[in-house]
Image: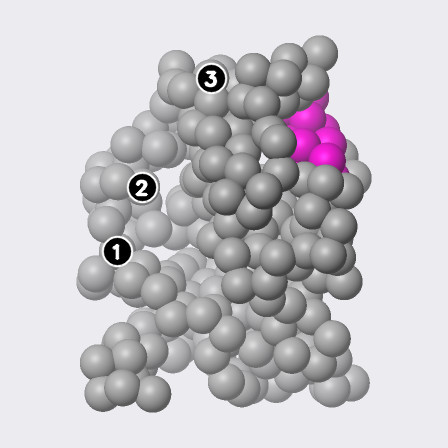
Amino acid sequence: MTRDKFKTMHSVFDDFTNRTIFKLITEGHFRGLQGPIKIGKESNVFSALKENNEKVAVKIYRLETCDFNRMYDYIKDDPRFANLKRKRRRIIFAWVQREYRNLLKARESNIKVPIPIAFLNNVLVEEFIGNGEAAPKLKDQIPENKKDFFNKIIENMKKLYKSGLVHADLSAFNILNYNENPVFIDMSQTTTLKHPRAEEFLIRDVKNICNFFKKTGLKASEESVLKKIRK
C-alpha cells in the first residue's frame, strides 16, 4: 500500500468515529475491524468479524473531507429529508441513514443489494458480499455470460424503479459480480422518483451500463432498456 493510500485509509479514524465504532461493537454488530475492502475519497469500507466469525462490511464516511455540498445537492429534494439543515455533520449523518433506508427498501423489493444491518452517525454496517474474499466489482471481472448478467442488471433496475427509486450513480464501479450475479452497492445517491432530476439520473444510469457492455462486445440499446424499465 502506498503512503498516500495508507494515510487516506487511516484518515477516517478521528476520535468521534472511533467512539461511534466502539458503540457499534458494544451493541454486538461486530467484534472489530479487519482489512480494508475499499479505500475511497469520501469513505472507506472494511471487513469486520462478528462473534460467530461471520463477516460484515463496515462503511465509514470521513467527517472532514466528504463533499457534503454534493451530498446536499442529492438529498435536499428527497422528501424523506425535507427539513435537513445545511450543516456538514448533519448532512453526512443523513447520507448514511439514507443509504441504510435505500438498501432496506431495495431488499424489500427483492433487489440484490447488501442487507443493511445498522447505522450510527457516519458509520454503516451491512452484509459482506463474497466467498471469503470480497466479491469483485463488475469493472474488474467480466461475467462469463455477459447477456444474462446484463439482463439481470436491467431487471434489478426495473424493480428499483417500480419501488419508486433510481440508483443515480450506477456503473460497473458499484455493481459486484458475485457468483455471476449482479449486486448493487453504494446506494447513498439513490433517490426517489419525486426528485426533479430522477429521470435524468435514470437515463445516465442506463447509459453507463449500456456503454460498459457495448465495450465488451454486447449489443445494448439505451432506448430499449429504458422502455423495459418504465414498462
What residue range appears in magenta? 151-162
Label at residue 137: none
Q: Which structural element holds mark 1?
A: loop
Instruction: Point out the frontmost of discs 3 and 1.
Output: 3
Q: Position of residue 5 (x, y in %)?
A: 28, 79
Residue, x 68% and y 40% (percent of image)? 150
Q: Which structural element holds mark 2?
A: helix
Query: Mark 3 highlights which residue?
Result: 199
* The quarter of the displayed image where residue 84 is located: top left
Residue type at the position of mark 3: Glu
Residue, x 50% and y 85% (percent of image)? 35
* The quarter of the displayed image where residue 161 is located: top right
Query: Mark 2 highlights which residue?
Result: 71
Point out the tag, 3 or 1, that comes first from the N-terminus: 1
Q: Position of residue 165 (x, y in %)?
A: 58, 27
Does the residue at mark 3 contact the one at mark 2 (Cβ under 8 Å)?
Answer: no
Of 190 and 146, nearer the camera is 146
- Residue 8 appears anywhere in the view: yes
Q: Is residue 32 magenta?
A: no
The relative height of residue 12 versus residue 142 in the rendered view (above or below) is below
Quadrant of the image containing the N terminus: bottom left
Point out the tag, 3 or 2, that comes first from the N-terminus: 2
Q: Is residue 160 magenta?
A: yes
Instruction: Point out the frontmost of discs 3 and 2.
Output: 3
Label at residue 66: 1
Of 46 and 207, nearer the camera is 207
Residue, x 78% and y 85% (percent of image)? 52
Q: Position of residue 153 (x, y in %)?
A: 67, 39
Residue, x 74% and y 75% (percent of image)? 131
Quadrant of the image containing the C terminus: top right
